[in-house]
Amino acid sequence: MTWLPWVRRVGWAGLAALLLLVPPLVLPSFYVNLATKVLIFAILAMSLDLLLGYTGLWSFGHAAFFGVAAYAVGLFTLRVQNNFALAILVSLGATALVAAVFGLLVLRTRGVYFMMLTLALAQVLWGVAFKWRSVTGGDDGLPAIPRPDLSPLPFKAVTSADFYVLTAVVFILVTVLMFLITRSPFGHSLEGIRENEVRMSALGYNVWLHGYLVYILSAVFAGVAGLLFVYYNGIVSPTDLSVVRSAEALLMVVLGGGGTLFGPIFGALVVVLLQNLVGIYTERWLTILGLVYVLTVLFAPRGIYDAIRRRFPLARLQPRARYASSHPE
Amino acid sequence: MSGAPTLSIEALNKSFGALRVLVDVDLSVAAGERRVLIGPNGAGKTTLFNVVTGLLAADSGSITMLGHDITRLPTHRRVSLGLARTFQITALFPNLTLRRNLLLALQGCSRTKFSMLRPMSAQAQLLGPAEELLEQWDMADQRDALVKELSYGEQRQVEILLAIAQRPKLLLLDEPTAGLSPAETARVVEVIRALPRELTMLLIEHDMDVAFQLADTISVLHMGQVLVTGDRQTVQLDQRVREIYLGQVAEKLALS
Amino acid sequence: MTILTIQGLNALSYGMLLFLLSVGMTLTFGLLRIVNLTHGTYYLVGGYVGLAVLGLTRSFLAGLLAAGLAMGALGLCTERWLFRRYAGNEPAQVLLSLGLLFLFGDLALGVWGGSPRTIPAPEGLQGAVEIGGQFFPAYRLALVAIGLVVALLLWLLLERTKLGVMVRAAVDDADLAQAMRVNVPLVMTGVFTFGALLAGVAGVLGGPLIGMYPGGDFDVLLLATVIVILGGMGSLRGAFVGALLIGLIDTLGRSSFPEFSLFAIFAPMALILVIRPTGLFGRRT
């Protein structure tokens, strides 16, 4: 039965192709935009899951990295030039730098203190974005950011459909990378840390170092989401760094189910859909969000994805740890 | 068994506030020696382990292992020099499978643990030894069971298994047979006795039978101080030991 | 000189207000080991309730009472029916309280609208009092007095009464307290309810100064969190000192650097946490 894993792989590739091609061709632009948003936030949610679900570090300020990348792109594109490749370098570099500094501060704490410290640091950045009008535009933010210039590549990413394809490509790249990381020895170490830090130390792991590395890594992935978002939205403002944004990301991970890459993707889908569709009928989006939060904790504490997986084992979207069988692939 | 001691503890002190838990502890374990640490509850045995392994910092004194001064080193550095321990309260990775627990132990001191892009399933150099160890300990058919679903006895076995997987030079066992049935205890004793003779071991035990099956020398700890170190007879005849144990242990020592 | 003393009073009165707000949160954390994010709601909604009752009865005191009781009831309900189920599960409690914060905050927005509201100070305290040749707002002076009285009463309660001993025992070591026949669940509910009550009262007391506005729950929550972490979770003294400190920093910050006062609060907190991860007076849990 050695062809079974290959069938799975082809199946996955096919699904990926489907994701890429169908929406822009078939759906009206409102839905294409929605799909773009889902993918962007799925990346953000996955980045947080790496920290939260896999390593057990509850970051309440993840929007900080989303926002830093967004502002970096905004500033670079408006003040210097519109070049996608350079914008990526600048924004992800800035994000990594901020994460490297923050990481030194936060990784000495755990639990609630870690939550509060990450929140506080994100608030510091929010405060800076809010007050430093001359650079960040303050409350108004930086508007009129154009879609990215992809030259020297012969593609354009201006229309909704084209931008969607760009987002989908990035999404697939990010997902594959995350997949590899979580299946790697490093990924395993992260789960070990989540399960029992003291034991990990006693096995020879430098727990702090692993924490630091995953913190920066997850920040950079969040930055990828941020950079896509600012191009999508055309504007960056302090909201992108706000605690509400961090809370949304947190909800996506918790709702979908942490520690599984697909949970956060699912969570992002649910939250973005809720946000946009609920908004049509009522202004009380935050009430609904709060309610969903409470209901999730009460009834689906391990996430909706997990609840579904238990009910429908055949519909398992995620293969179990591959080497659980006696013939590792 | 000649040459420098594997573990050398000198004038070690540790206090929690006003409570002095370790008082000028001097202890030396030779290469390949099997030393058992006994003493009443609260004598400071586990604290000593915690200080030696780096979970707690000593207030003063020094700890030397295999020629390295490890007194101020973080735990993981001590481990990379050849130290391993088991915990009195089982410390495993509950939501991970037995196999994954073992893999984490096996890669603990290897560079592989930083590898991010190649899957674990491709790490033959870890998977092979993991499988071997599982076979050796008769736990191969439980490789995919979540550790939290194993019985207490099995978990205590895994506790030791993880430490051994690290291929240490100095092994600290904190009450390895605590809470085990006689059959399980016998099993554990068997496995520990089968360990390579060059492995230096320091053992905390309450069960005297087990202690004597496994150890050559005994150190008695009381109120944070090492009262006496010696073979079975020396300890049993020691006046202070007799006083402390009010004859209970001393009698047991005499009987066995 | 005049400006300094006026600012000093501002800082002091603001600090007292923050103290009243944070006490509940620090005691709740000491016991339940969670930072109850819904705490911000007690302040905001308490203020709105107080305003509504004031409008009906024309009595500031009635407003105070109503806010305290209403928020106490809210605290009681959420503790008994929601938080109690998740004892020991920090993330669940934080998520739960975050959800409630969003929920109540948005509902409040729906009910009371988006314009900032203030509560008029009680008639007797609307003027200024002359002390040593300078005029100080009577309300702020009253606030300082109230804060000191409450702090003193709480201190006496915790240190000198049997109830206080029980609470402190439950805070220090819940299992041991339970073994000593302290009804820990009752104490927990009681402390939680009291904290919410106090925060609601603070909401009304703060009405003439800060007022109520959308997002006020968040701002107040963040301030209380900073104070509680700074002072050490579970420490009454820490909450007092922390509140005064933050009151001082915030007031001075606003007057010196109108641009940067917001994150001036977080910078010291981040700094303290880095140096002393358990806060100024906290103990390692």
Image (spheres, coloured by chain):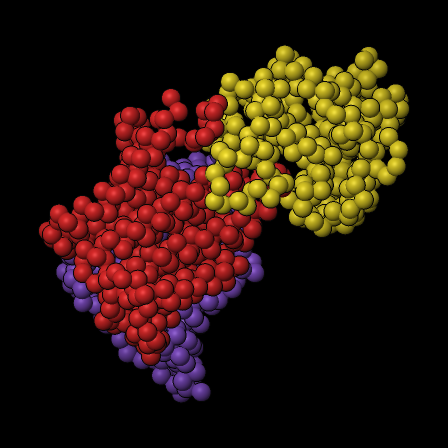
Chain colours: A red, B yellow, C purple
Q: Residue at x 36, y 41 (%)?
A: A261
In the drawing, does residue B8 fall left or right of residue A279? right
Residue A158 lies in quadrant: bottom left
Residue C221: give x, y in percent of width and height.
35, 58
Q: Residue at x 23, y 54 (%)?
A: A164
The correct choice, above or below, for A42 with respect to C253 in the image is above
The answer to whether residue C250 of the structure is visible from this angle is: yes
In the drawing, does residue C170 fall left or right of residue A148? right
Residue C66 lies in quadrant: bottom left
Image quarter in which the N terminus of chain C is found? bottom left
Residue B221 lies in quadrant: top right
| Front-lying residue, B207 or A169 | A169
The correct choice, above or below, for B193 with respect to B72 in the image is above
The answer to whether residue B208 of the structure is visible from this angle is: no
The correct choice, above or below, for A105 with respect to C3 in the image is above
| Front-lying residue, C194 or A57 | A57
How many numbered marks are there? 0
| Front-lying residue, A36 or A149 | A149
Residue A235: give x, y in percent of width and height.
25, 67
Q: Residue at x 49, y 41 (%)?
A: B118
Residue A194: give x, y in percent of width and height.
48, 41
Residue C141: give x, y in percent of width and height.
37, 73
Q: Residue at x 56, y 42 (%)?
A: B113
